Amino acid sequence: MSGGPEGRIRVTGNPRWIVGVDIGGTNLCVGLVPWEGGEPLALRRLPTLAAGGGEAVVARVVEMIRSSMAEVLGSTGAPPEAVAGVGIGSPGPLDRSSGVVITTPNLGWRNFPLRELVTDRIQLPATLDNDANCATYGEWWLGAGQGVDTLVGMTLGTGIGGGIILDGEIFHGVSDAAAEIGHMTINFGGRRCKCGNYGCLEAYASGPNIAARAVEGIEAGAHSLLSEMVEGDLDALTAAHVSEAALAGDVYAHEVILETAKLLGVGVANIINALNPGAVVIAGGVTRAGDLLFDPIRAEVRRRAFRPAAEACRILAAHLPETAGVIGAAAVFKRVAVGHL
Amino acid sequence: MSGGPEGRIRVTGNPRWIVGVDIGGTNLCVGLVPWEGGEPLALRRLPTLAAGGGEAVVARVVEMIRSSMAEVLGSTGAPPEAVAGVGIGSPGPLDRSSGVVITTPNLGWRNFPLRELVTDRIQLPATLDNDANCATYGEWWLGAGQGVDTLVGMTLGTGIGGGIILDGEIFHGVSDAAAEIGHMTINFGGRRCKCGNYGCLEAYASGPNIAARAVEGIEAGAHSLLSEMVEGDLDALTAAHVSEAALAGDVYAHEVILETAKLLGVGVANIINALNPGAVVIAGGVTRAGDLLFDPIRAEVRRRAFRPAAEACRILAAHLPETAGVIGAAAVFKRVAVGHL
């Protein structure tokens, strides 16, 4: 079954777990997700170290899968067949049917046969879907988006990923490239984005870009706790530092969060005007800022989105920020294998 | 049946036509659309004259419906029952189930019971849907979008309307407010839009805003045929004049069209990155500029959209610019009444 098209995946017997694999620009995360849903077991998390190349990333993922499976099978005494297969979430664009990652600016892969490389080593059927689709599907299945049929997810990480759930299914578009919400232009002459475009939402509000905007202000003379937090090494500044400093009362960091919220609000308003979803779920390190971030996002959305659409849409923090990607990747496997969750 | 919820509409006997009503910010259009599809018969077109108020608009629409029906029934000898009902397309946001237009910036309506007002006078069942949804559905049924399951339509008129077709059905979102593509922010600190927001696509590329941008340049000293075309009365300048002048070789008008195309390209790229459709169909007066408009739109999309999504999407001029709204409004009626087209 390995390497075959998704449609050929079949699950027999009584599966108890699915391996969920979440490949991010910064971290890899692997765990065993209970077949009927639940927190992943034997979670493993390692840095992606994308600069080492795709083969090295796959080798590490395979080790993580083996280690998770060994722990769970060892402690439960379950047979290997209790693990139905592997759901992989990866940055894209990608081709689900061939399991190939076409290109990913944050990892530097091109036409990378990710699914086949994993199945060849693990000897289990696998599915591949976009990491942000998976995270959104995970939040829809077991997290903040439960019961919301039309849902958009945004993950503010190394990049900004997006996922769209319509009528309880991931919406993929005609070539698996839908929901690239981070690359929505919100300012056509604006900041350069890693994708080559100018003024993308991601160019303002991804983790590294939040940090970069904060650094720009400090270099221009803004006073802030942030400099001390990184002992003057501004290259080490992250969006999480900015959130922490804002929560600790730092005025400048609060300003950066507020500006970030307004920019995210522009993006969320665009999503709401286009798709009129029941909820937008936002995940990522910067969401630690909580209401400092979410209140001004909601205010900006009220200003920018049409009222009937804005009123119909809740803007929520993710409930499963650490594990939605793993859970959702496993959910995709189950959906493909048996047609439902 | 009049005024009842959509779900109650039933068609019996052998319907031959559906009345299609297209209410636009500038013009009203009514015609009888053949049940199995085809060009509308006995087309009537009148200015909307929105300033006269909603009741006056409805009175004119009702007269147009009566006149169209009289012509077709008179010339064919068909009985009144051969007209199954009325499909109405109106600017929104609106509530399909109650048939009420909630608000429409370009017409000044608020909580306006449009469907009931029409059915009370015409005594035929009716449906109400967004005008741009209808135009897109019309292009999907009989126009440029035939055979494209996932399709986005844009109508550049008084405002910029949008419609989204997914798997051959109009996508409405959770409260009938989806596809407000004209109010996508493409420049967060940009031009004020009629909707109250800043930097909407519509604030740059609707008909009146194309004309306004052209006038701004002329007032700032640009030389152009445009001034002569309106005999110095720049208030009379329209986007159609700009297209004509560009086609006639006017350098400044060409510049305005090129700038318009780049702005539209930003919007289309955002749509493509979000929805990965098989086609985007663009309608409206300014599309008379043809390749002068479409070539730079496509170029901007190639620069801004992810390649797998851009490559999967054709960017097409509408085939039914004058009648897609009427055809699509009738198509909505048929879809609601019998569940298919």
Image (tube, coloured by chain):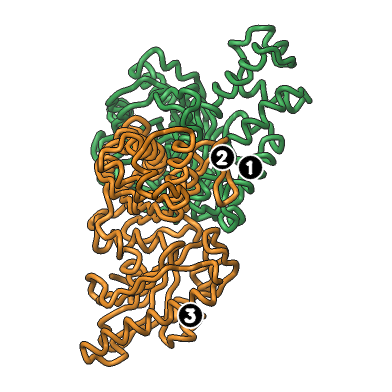
Chain colours: A orange, B green
Disc sitting over residue A59 in the figure: 3
A197 lies above or below A300: below
Question: What crowding class fits label 2: few (fewer than 14 Cα within 10 Å), some (14-19), or many (20 or more)?
Answer: many
Q: Residue at x 33, y 27 (%)?
A: B103
What element does badge 3 sit on? Answer: helix
**Front-lying residue, A207 or B153:** A207
In the figure, A234 relative to A100: above or below? above
Q: Nearer the viewer, residue A39 or B294?
A: A39
Which residue: 48% across, 29% down?
Answer: B199
The residue where tag 2 is placed is B266
Query: Three-letter amino acid code at disc 2?
Result: Val
For badge 3, the amino acid type reads: Ala
Which mark is drawn over residue B300?
Answer: 1
**Disc 3: host chain:** A
Specify the quadrant of the image occupied by residue B238. top right
Q: Chain of mark 2?
A: B
Establish whether labels 1 and 2 are both on one chain: yes
Residue B74 visible, this orientation: no
